[in-house]
Image (cartoon, rainbow, N blue to C red):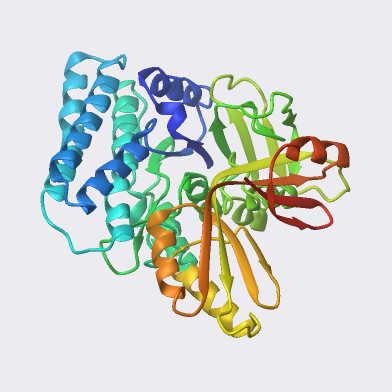
Amino acid sequence: MKVFKFGGASVKDAAGVMNLHRILSLFTGNSILVVVSAMGKTTNKLELVIQAWYTGNTPEAVEHIEELRFYHQELIRGLEMDLSQQEALLSSTDVFFNELREMVVKPTDAYYNQIYDQIVAYGELISTHIISGYLNAKQIANRWLDAREFIVTNDTFRDARINWSKTESNIVKLANNEGLIDGINVTQGFIGRVDGTKLTTTLGREGSDFTASIFAYCLGAKDVTIWKDVPGVLNADPKLFPFAEKIDELSYEEAVEMTYYGASVIHPKTIKPLQNKGIKLYVRSFLKPELEGTVIRQIDEWRSFPPCIIVKKNQMLISFASRDFSFVAEESLSLIFGELYKLGIKAHISQNSAISFRICVDEDPFKVQPFIEAVSSHFDVSTEGGLSLWTLRHQSEKLEKGLISGKTVLLEQRSKSAVQYVLR
C-alpha cells in the first residue's frame, strides 16, 4: 500500500483533478490510499460561512455557501466525462451543499470551535466525493472512505488529539476485512470524530499531511508521497527568498525540526509516526511528477544541511506581568500553559524573567481572546499583533545580519543549531 496526499492547490480546478488522474495512471498495479484536501480556497470560504453563522448573519452565510456550490459545479462541468456522468455527479454533490444550507439557517448554541469543525469538514467531503466520482467515470474503480469512521480523537476542536489505539484498531479492521480494495481508495485529510459521538473534529490547519501519516502508520504502508506545487522540500519560501534551493534528502530528525519551527511544506505532526515504522516520505511536484523531489528517511551518518529560513506571519506577542512583583514561577506557568492547552494554542516561543513572561502565538482572535480572558484575572496582560516569527537553522552570521536588517527585534532566542526572532 502506498499513501498519496494531494493538497487543495493540486485540485483547485478541473485541470488539477484531471492531473491527479494522470498521476495515478503512472502507478497502475499499485494499491494506493489517496488522501485529499478541500479544493482550492474552499476552507477559507467555509471560514467565512462559519463567521457569518456564528454572528447571526444567516443571509451572508447562505450566500457564501451558494458561491461555493457554483465554484464546485463549474469545476465538475470542466471535467472530461459524459454529460450523463456529469449530471449525476452534480446532483450527488448538491447533497452536501443542501446539508450545509440546512445547518446554517438554524440557530446554534455551540461554541465557535465546535461549529468550525462541523462546517469546515465539508470541504474535504465534497472534494473527495468529486474526485472519486471522476475516477469512476474514467474507469478507475475506487472506494470512497469517510475518514471520520476511522480517525478517533478527543474533543479539542480545531486541533484534535488522536486516540491512537482506537484509530489503529479501526484502520487495521478496515484492511483485514477487505474494506480497502486492490487499487485506489479515496479519503479525506484533516478530519476525524470525537470518540463515541457523531461530532466532527479537525486536526489543525493543513492537517491532511498528518492524516496521510496516520493511515500509513496503521497500514504499515510502503511509503507516503505528498504532492505539492514545489519541486520538493526547499530551504526557504521561494515567494519570499528567490535564492531558495531544493534539498534532495533529509533525515527524519531534520524534517521534524523544520516542521516544528513552522516550515509549511509538511504538517508538524506528520514525521514522527512515519519515523517510528521507518516509512519513507517523498515530497514531489504534481506539476512535474516525473521529477524525484525530496525523500525523508532514516539517515544515520552525519550530514550537513544548507541554511534554512522559516517565516511565520500573523504572529502575536503576549506578555504577562505579576501584579504584586512576585516571581513568575511554576504555579503561574502551569496556569498559563494549562489554558493554552485547553484552547489548542501553541506557544512558538516562550521567554521568562523573574516577574514577567512572554509567548509568541498565532494571531487567531477566536482562540487568543478566550485565552486572555481566562488568565487576565491573574496577570497584567499586554499584546502586540501583526508580527512575524523568523527561524534560521544552520545559520551563518552574515546571512543572519542581512535578514534582520531594518527590522525591529522584539524577542530573540538561540540554541546550538537555530536562532529565532519575533520581528516587527
Q: Can residue 335 be seen by looking at this rendering? A: yes
Q: Quadrant of the C terminus?
A: top right
Q: Position of residue 405 (x, y in %)?
A: 76, 37
Name the residue rendered at 44%, 67% in the picture: 371
Name the residue rendered at 72%, 35% in the picture: 235
Q: Position of residue 116 (x, y in %)?
A: 31, 53
Q: Position of residue 332 (x, y in %)?
A: 57, 81
Q: Can residue 306 be seen by looking at this rendering? A: no
Q: Position of residue 146 (x, y in %)?
A: 32, 48
Task: Point out the residue furthest to the front here.
Answer: 324
Name the residue rendered at 50%, 75% in the picture: 338
Residue 358 versus residue 327 in the image, above or below = above
Q: Which of the 4 image quadrants contains residue 100?
A: top left
Q: Which of the 4 image quadrants contains residue 63?
A: top left
Q: How many marks?
A: 0
**Between residues 129 and 30, which one lies in front from this camera angle?**
129
Asked if residue 179 lies left or right of residue 111, the reply is right
Name the residue rendered at 42%, 22% in the picture: 16
**Between residues 293 and 46, which one lies in front from this camera angle?**
46
Asked if residue 16 lies left or right of residue 234, the reply is left
**Between residues 201 and 324, which one lies in front from this camera angle?**
324
